Amino acid sequence: MVSAFDNLELSNFIGKSLEFISYGCGSATDTCVLKSYLTSKQINLDIKSVTLIEPSLASLKRGKEYVQSAFKIREVNKTINELNINDIASQPDTVKLHVFSNILDIKDIDLERLANLLKESQKGANYFVCISPTRYNEKRIDNFYDIMSNLFEISDISITDETIKGRVYHMKQGGFNNSYPIDRYERIFFTYAN
């Protein structure tokens, strides 16, 4: 997420009203990373709301606990396939940041339905951050991108297929590996819809 936020250049959003929408948020890890990133970079953004979408009620509640002191939270306890327009309704005059972190690779998600729902519901400026480990099928992210490009005029921001080094705790070894290789595929793009 940190690399994605770097590539998105979040400082460019200073002075704009934002909505952050996290799909399959789990315990709101990406939202926690956002808050940490903004604090560490000393970037003050006007985030009007954070929408956490997660089918696990326990994870959703935990995620809300983590971030509710920092953001105005809207909870949606549904799978992505169950979403409707009201669940992801947004303001046309805000900039929307849609985050799909380790979620689009789930084969049960109907990418066409999701893209059409976004087309119906998201007016104005929309940024899409799609990230997944490469070993889990970057093709799903590319398929989502292709479907979206048939519905929206798209501007590419970042396409990255790389291995980064991260700090990972190994349960079997009982310690941290500070340079564990993590494969990641990232696609960030922009749309504007009237």
Image (cartoon, grey):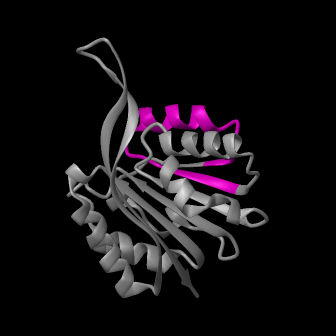
The structure residue drawn at horizontal position 27% and vertical position 60%, both measured from the top left corner, is 109
Quarter of image, res 95: bottom right
User: Percent from the top left, x then y, of residue 132?
Assistant: 33, 52
Taking the magenta stretch, the answer to whether it contains residue 142 is no
* Residue 182 located left or right of residue 95: left
* Residue 34 located left or right of residue 76: right
The span shown in magenta is 48-73
Number of numbered markers: 0
Q: Residue furthest right?
A: 15
- Viewer-proximal residue, 47 or 86? 47
Q: Is residue 21 visible?
A: no
**Position above or below: 17 against 72:** below
User: Percent from the top left, x then y, of residue 93?
Assistant: 70, 75
**Position above or below: 84 against 47:** below
Quarter of image, res 15: bottom right
* Residue 73 located left or right of residue 62: right
The structure residue drawn at horizontal position 67% and vertical position 46%, both measured from the top left corner, is 38
- Viewer-proximal residue, 128 or 94? 128
- Viewer-proximal residue, 67 or 12? 12
The structure residue drawn at horizontal position 42% and vertical position 73%, both measured from the top left corner, is 117
Taking the magenta stretch, the answer to whether it contains residue 55 is yes
* Residue 107 located left or right of residue 133: left
- Viewer-proximal residue, 113 or 14? 14
**Position above or below: 89 against 77:** below
In which quadrant is the C terminus drawn? bottom right
User: Percent from the top left, x then y, of residue 165?
Assistant: 38, 39
**Position above or below: 150 against 36:** below
Q: Residue furthest top?
A: 174
